[in-house]
Image (tube, rainbow, N blue to C red):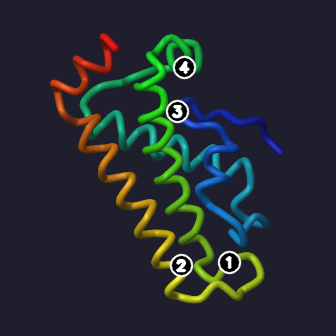
Amino acid sequence: MAGHTGIYATSAECIAKLGDNYNSTNVNETMINEFCLQAEGLINGMCRKVFAADSTAFSALSATTKHILSEVTSNLVGIYGLTHKPTGEDGTMNRIEFEDRINILRDGLLRGLSILRDKKAQVFLENA
C-alpha cells in the first residue's frame, strides 16, 4: 500500500468522512490518494489559486486556511469514496442513509468552496 500523498487532507480525515461501512476493500490508500489529487485540483482550479504546492507549503498556512482546505478536500473524497459502492462494504447501506451521507458532505463541500472562492476571504486567509 502506498503512503499518503494528499496535501490538503490526511488519510485519517478522509476515512473519517467516509464513515463506517464504506467500501474499504476498494477505497484503499491508493484510491484515497487519487481522490485527494482530484479534489485538490478542483479546489485550485475553482479558486484560481494554488493554496499549497506541497506539504511544506501547506504546513506554513494559517490554521484556519488549513482546516478549510482539509474540510473541503475530505468532504469531496468522502463523496467519491461512498459513491464507489453506495451499498457499503457489506452491502447493507440503504439508499436513504447513502443519500444523507452524500448530502451532508456536499453541503460542507459547497460551503467551503464558497468561502475559498471569495477573493476577500482569500485575502483574509492569507493574512490570518
Q: How crowded is mark 2: few (under 14 residues within 10 Å), some or many (20 or more)?
A: some
Q: Which one is in front, 16 or 41?
A: 16
Is the residue under label 2 in contact with that under label 1 (CB below 8 Å)? yes
Task: Report the Cα–Cα distance between label 3 and label 1.
Answer: 25 Å
Q: Mark 4 points at which residue?
A: 54
Q: Name the residue under label 1.
A: 88
Looking at the image, tell me whether mark 1 or mark 2 is earlier in sequence order.
1
Q: Name the residue under label 3.
A: 8
Would residue 80 appear left or right of 65 to someone viewing this image? Answer: right
Q: Residue at x 30, y 10 (%)?
A: 127
Task: Report the Cα–Cα distance between label 3 and label 4.
Answer: 9 Å
Looking at the image, tell me whether mark 3 or mark 2 is earlier in sequence order.
3
Is the residue under label 4 in contact with that under label 3 (CB below 8 Å)? no
- Locate residue 20, reporting x and y percent: 71, 67
Q: Which one is in front, 76 or 44?
A: 76
Q: Name the residue under label 2.
A: 98
